[in-house]
Amino acid sequence: MGCYCRLCGRERANEKFSGKGHSVHVCKDCWNLPPPRKERIEREEEILGFLRQSRISAKNRKRLAVLSEHADAELRHLAELVLRVSKISEGKRKRWRKVSAIDPELYQECLKQYLPDYPEDFEWDGGFRPGQGSALSKAVAEL
Ligand SMILES: [Zn+2]
């Protein structure tokens, strides 16, 4: 029986958690990351979390607007994309279908950031497969 780390998303053995880390569900490896890196993963998780909600509320969009001015350029870009997506489709249902129909360019950009789930009709060019990993898991793979 282990514990789930909310930063790296891994299910890890209890001894991989310190007392304090355990209570906030962050494993020792992630706990010891330099703060900017931790901040980045946390903010990224926050942004991606909005996409998993059934609806992105007005309050969420306000938060995304704040994050789209973040000092980190990649976070800014990610927040901007999700904000634009939320303006096309607040709701999760058929979101990517709507985005691809209304703003194909935005959709392509989101695919590059691995935001949409892997769509059935997406023609895979042999590169990294969208939906196979979130931007977060990509960041963790680089640790
Ligand atoms: Zn971890």
Image: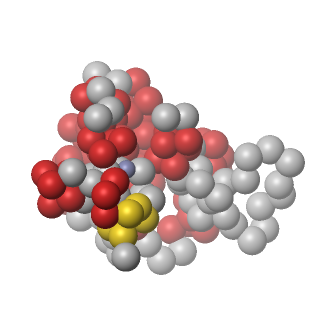
Q: Nearer the viewer, residue 50 or 12?
A: 12
Q: Within the image, what quadrant is residue 121 found in? A: bottom right
Residue 83 seen in render: no
Instruction: Please give left or right for residue 132 compared with residue 59 in the image.
Output: right
At horizontal 44% and vertical 59% (from top left) the residue drawn is 10
Q: Within the image, what quadrant is residue 12 found in? A: bottom left
Task: Establish if 55 lies above or below 80.
Answer: below
Q: Nearer the viewer, residue 74 or 29?
A: 29
Where residue 29 appears, x then y in whole percent? 36, 42
Task: Establish if 39 lies above or below 10.
Answer: above
| Tally of marks | 0
Q: Within the image, what quadrant is residue 96 found in? A: bottom right
At horizontal 73% and vertical 46% (from top left) the residue drawn is 128
Q: How is the image coloured?
A: secondary structure
Residue 136 seen in render: yes
Where residue 135 appears, x then y in whole percent? 51, 45
Where residue 64 appears, x then y in whole percent? 27, 45
Where residue 56 appears, x then y in whole percent? 30, 64
Instruction: Please give left or right for residue 2 compared with residue 117 in the image.
Output: left
Instruction: Please give left or right for residue 95 compared with residue 32 in the image.
Output: right
Q: Nearer the viewer, residue 102 or 36?
A: 36
At horizontal 30% and vertical 45% (from top left) the residue drawn is 28
At horizontal 65% and vertical 58% (from top left) the residue drawn is 132
Task: Establish if 56 lies above or below 72.
Answer: below
Image quarter (top left, top right, bottom left or bottom right) of the N terminus:
bottom left
